[in-house]
Amino acid sequence: MLNLSSRAGGTVIAALGLALSVFHARTAELLRDDPALAVVDGALPLVLSAVMVLAGAGMARGRLVPDQFVERVLAWVGVGVLALLTAAGWLFAHALTTDALPPDPVLTLLNAATFGSLVGYLVGVYDARRRRQQLRADQLRHVNDTLRIVTQDIVDADDRSELERRVCERLQESSTYESAWIGRYERGAEAVRPDAWSGLDDEYYESVVVTVDEDDPLGRGLGGRAVRTGEIQCSQDVAADPSMEPWQDLIETYDVASIAVVPIVDDDAVVGILSLYADRPFVFDEPERTVLAELGETIGHAVSSLEAREQLRQRERELENQNRHLEEFASVVSHDLRNPLNVAQGSLTLEREERDSDHLRRASDALARMDELVDQVLTLARTGTVVSEFASVDLEAVAAEAWRTTRTGPATLDVEAPLGAVPGDESRIRELFENLYRNAVEHSSTSPRSTSSREDAVEHGSTNPDSQAREGAVEHGSTNPGSQAPRGGDSEHGDEGVTVTVGATDGGFYVADDGSGIPESDRESVFEAGFSTSDEGTGFGLNIVRSIADAHGWDVSVTESEAGGARFEFTNVGTADGGVVGRESPSE
């Protein structure tokens, strides 16, 4: 095969038409004395040959016939000429038998050749276009089938190296491509080399170097342009492509005829290139380039997803280590610290039975506070562990249950149903509500919005020294049920109880009260471990609330309620059916 281009083929057609035009123009000039004969044997063939010139010029500009079908069109032109010359010859043979030869056999044959060449050209163009459509349909069907398999391999891959290897193998196994390789690129890198490949010898891929610098001959090829522009680059005939000169020897050795380089893109950033080789020219037409560009984006998104999954696995490993350390810490606190503490408490109790004093009472109070701190630290260590097994939790039922297990005195609970069900750990969610209830009740213990000021809201302590402030004030409260008094009637909360409201929001839920509220200056600090405005508070209550929210993947914030108290809002709370819990925020 000659592998003629459209320019070369069109030039041949135009030259043939021009030669015939000169001849027919001369004939028309010679026959000017016989107008009828001049039209039939001169003007009409001249018009046909002029059409040949125009057709050849259009073909040379690549408008009528794709390069891969130029030889096919020329063959049809030859067939047309040969067919009409044969027909004319048959007529001459018939005339010889009857002694009635035409007056000018040469003119007759050239007229037949002109007509035959034009007819052959038109038939060739039609055949080329029909053939092109058929090949395009077959090729696209095959490419789509290949890409469907490749996409499945991309989905199934566990890491980037495996993904790249599978893509190259699948593409090379198709009948369209002889070879495929993928090279990784990082921003600022000077060169790209194959990292995964299939189809040719390993020595070839190991010798390939593509640079990014456009001033470097190795950077002016398809790969360098693909990295710089982020667009697919193709060479339909590498033997005639001057930009492929640095690789000509390698390409000729392996009979590579056409190449496409597809940028692997993620979020408009090039993270690699995919090079595809074919052993025949003009493989990568516009529809196939579009499909391959989409493949590049798919691979880029898959690479990003795999990297994100690897980061997630790393984060999970870190969380597992963190949870293990928390468990070890809780074990140390539970055994190594509580045992001597119990010994001290027992000894002090025996001593106080024989003789008591203010010093011993202060020591007893200090040991009781230490015991309370141990409870809080253990709770914090346990609730901070990320939830790994989720169950469907009825928020309304858990909120009510937490109220029954919390000392609330004359306070009241108002649950604005429905709250719905959320995925989570029921025991930890109940602890979250219990700590919020204690926070609302205890910082309002001097009667809501009467004698207490805004500044007394955070960790406001009880005035009863023997009670140890009943676990302090805001952010203070042991989750040990044994330390909780039964609900109702506790005079330390005053005659007028606070009202706690639990309701749904758009994307979560809230717990609010009508107490004294939390000063705006303290709202960023109330969730910090150890933050307390009371000497008797532990500062762990609301930190436990935040740790439980974090363990579930929720966000928590504190604002002022409509009644002027504190309002804790939980957002990004998923529902048990995969949706988002909540509705429009109700009035409190």
Image (cartoon, rainbow, N blue to C red):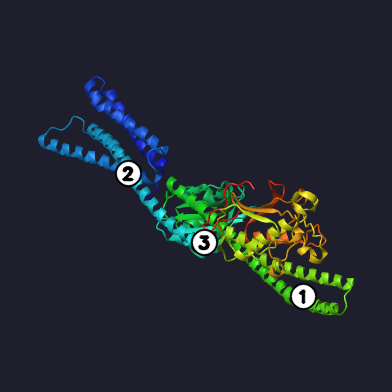
Task: Please give the residue where the numbered disc 2 appears in the rendered image.
Answer: 130
Which disc is residue 163 wearing?
Answer: 3
Confirm or deny contact between disc 1 and disc 2 (CB under 8 A).
no
- Residue 26 in picture, x, y percent from top left: 30, 26
Mark before the other along the chain sequence, 1 or 3: 3
Question: Above or below — where is 482 with respect to 119?
Answer: below
Q: Residue at x 69, y 56 (%)?
A: 411
Mark before the other along the chain sequence, 1 or 2: 2
Callout in the foreground (2, 3): 3
* Residue type beneath disc 2: Arg
Mark 2–mark 3 distance (CA, rounded to whole Å) = 38 Å
Query: Mark 2 Cα within 10 Å, few/some/many (few <14, many 20+)?
Result: few
Q: Is residue 513 left or right of residue 229?
A: right
Question: Above or below — where is 437 with respect to 565?
Answer: below
Mark 1–mark 2 distance (CA, rounded to whole Å) = 88 Å
Which disc is residue 337 wearing?
Answer: 1
Question: Above or below — where is 531 with respect to 451?
Answer: below
Q: What secondary structure is found at the residue carrying circle 1?
A: helix
Q: Nearer the viewer, residue 530 or 22?
A: 530
Query: Mark 1 Cα within 10 Å, few/some/many (few <14, many 20+)?
Result: some
